[in-house]
Image (cartoon, rainbow, N blue to C red):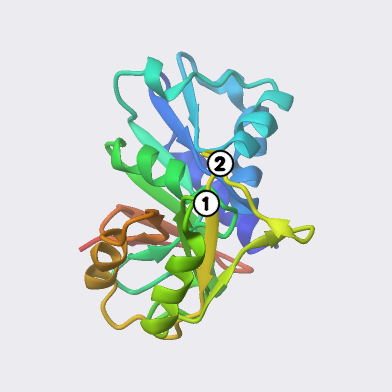
Amino acid sequence: MNPKFLAAQKALDYIKSNITLGLGTGSTTEIFIKLLAKRATDYSGLIFVSTSTQTTNFALKLGLTITPFEEVDSIDLTIDGADEVDNKLNGIKGGGGALLFEKIIAKNSKECIWIVDSTKLVDTLGAFPLPIEVIPFGYKSLIKKFETKKLNPKLRLLNGKPFITDSQNYIIDCRIGKIENPLELEPELKLLTGVVEVGLFNNIADKVVVGYTDKTEILERK
């Protein structure tokens, strides 16, 4: 069985009627949204908010209605994926380029659950490149600063041109290797002028649903 499918399927256990649900971005989340759309009649009063244009378009094609974030009072639960998760449930996100909106939705959610396959679990973050969203103006100076910090930065490209986020920014991916203290690195990077958001999601996930080929496991923040 597909581990991503099993994780996405298990996440349905946390959905109930009359809640506002944040929908994350990425391949595993899309499986979840597809499963949820098939079972939409099982619930009543669900309100959906989205973390990206990609997710919005995907959900709309499946018949779900997306409510603008500004029009909801609060978010009860967000289901999202992650590119890496350590043993303290801190993570790296932004491989799909939606880290800014994902973090805004997550920070305004009463509960956050990540759904991942077991390959995303690591002892120490950093094998996956760390995405850093920056404004286009002066991005080269930030690359130089990241080089000075030995973060091995590289501007993310799409079809030979800079990848553009939903908020019209660039992403610099940093191949750092082991991130020994993600809680210190996140604010350090965000203090640099021109940095919009960092793909370190510290102390955000309340639970992580991990899919294996034959089972799921629930990890909870201690």
Amino acid type, callout 1 = Pro
* Closer to viewer: mark 2 or mark 1: 1
**Is there CB contact under 8 Å for labels 2 and 1?**
yes
The quadrant of the rendering that contains the C terminus is bottom left
Give me the residue at 57% from left, 72% from top.
154
Give the tally of numbered discs: 2
- Tag shown at residue 168: 2
207 is higher (above) or lower (below) than 38: below
Would you call the spot at circle 2 few (<14 residues within 10 Å), some (14-19), or many (20 or more)?
Answer: few
Give me the residue at 25% from left, 67% from top.
188
**Residue 97 image point, x, y percent:** 56, 52
- Tag shown at residue 18: none
Q: Name, please, the residue furthest toward the right.
A: 159
Q: Quadrant of residue 111?
A: top left
The quadrant of the rendering that contains the N terminus is bottom right
Residue position for label 1: 136
The residue nearer to you, when weighing 49 against 170, is 170
Query: How far is disc 2 from disc 1 in space, using C-alphas?
Result: 8 Å
The residue nearer to you, when weighing 142 against 220, is 142
**Residue 42 image point, x, y percent:** 55, 22
**Residue 195 image point, x, y percent:** 38, 56
In terms of secondary structure, where does tag 2 sit?
A: loop
Among the two numbered marks 2 and 1 on one chain, the one whose residue lies closer to the N terminus? 1
Amino acid type, callout 2 = Gln
Residue 53 appearing in the image: yes
Give me the residue at 25% from left, 60% from top.
191
In terms of secondary structure, where does tag 1 sit?
A: loop
Give me the residue at 47% from left, 50% from top.
135
The residue nearer to you, when weighing 178 against 205, is 178
181 is higher (above) or lower (below) than 200: below
